[in-house]
Amino acid sequence: MEVHTMKTITLSHYQIRNIEPKPWKETWENLMEFVERMTPKLAPMQIRLKLRKVIMDDVSQESLMMGNMVTIESEEIGVEETPIENLLMIELAFSPCEDCKTTEDVPFACRTFIDFDGVKRQALPQEFFMEAVLRVAFQAENSGGCGCSSCSSCASGCGDEEQGERDEHHKHH
């Protein structure tokens, strides 16, 4: 029996202590549901999902801009912590949000993601996590086999092509 090592993919959600705008809460809920739903499906691929909540203490321009950021990383696969919008090449903007106020009641702009269809979202949907996790998981399947250092530049390309070739090999064995 082949022994595969479990690979952990960690999704981190950045929040600020005592600030809980609706889009942030929705993103976290979507993340929890996603991890719960996908964990049994990824187990046969030897992939374990881990969810991490990163709570920042200080309220600053920088931390407010990081609020509601979701990153993905996997040490075993060689993927350093990357904001998922970079991996998915989704445009990031900041837009007003009536719920986004600091504890001193100062309004701030909310991270907003603009997808290929120009749809703006402040809360991240499960599809985004799914796509990010699959891109990272396919890198694991190919053991980073596209020959480039970070693989993020070709993450969408290298997984799919090799997938087809590998399926061919399986038929002959």
Image: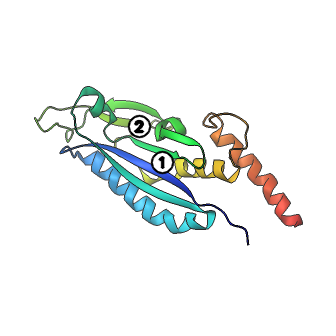
Q: Nearer the viewer, residue 18 or 21?
A: 18
Residue under the image location 31 percent in, 31 percent down: 65
Q: Quadrant of the N terminus?
A: bottom right
The x and y percentages for residue 131 are 54, 49
Q: Give the residue at x 26% y 31%.
A: 109
Q: Which residue is mark 1?
A: 128
**Do callouts 2 and 1 mark residues in contact (Cβ within 8 Å)?**
yes
Residue type at numbered disc 1: Phe
Furthest residue in direction left, as rendered:
104
Give the image location of residue 139, x and y in percent: 65, 47
Residue drawn at point x = 58 percent, y = 48 percent: 136
Is 95 situated above or below 7? above
Q: Is residue 169 left or right of residue 99?
A: right
Among the two numbered marks 2 and 1 on one chain, the one whose residue lies closer to the N terminus: 2
Q: Is residue 52 above or below residue 61?
A: below
Question: Which residue lies under the disc numbered 2?
Answer: 113
Secondary structure of the residue carrying tag 2 is: strand
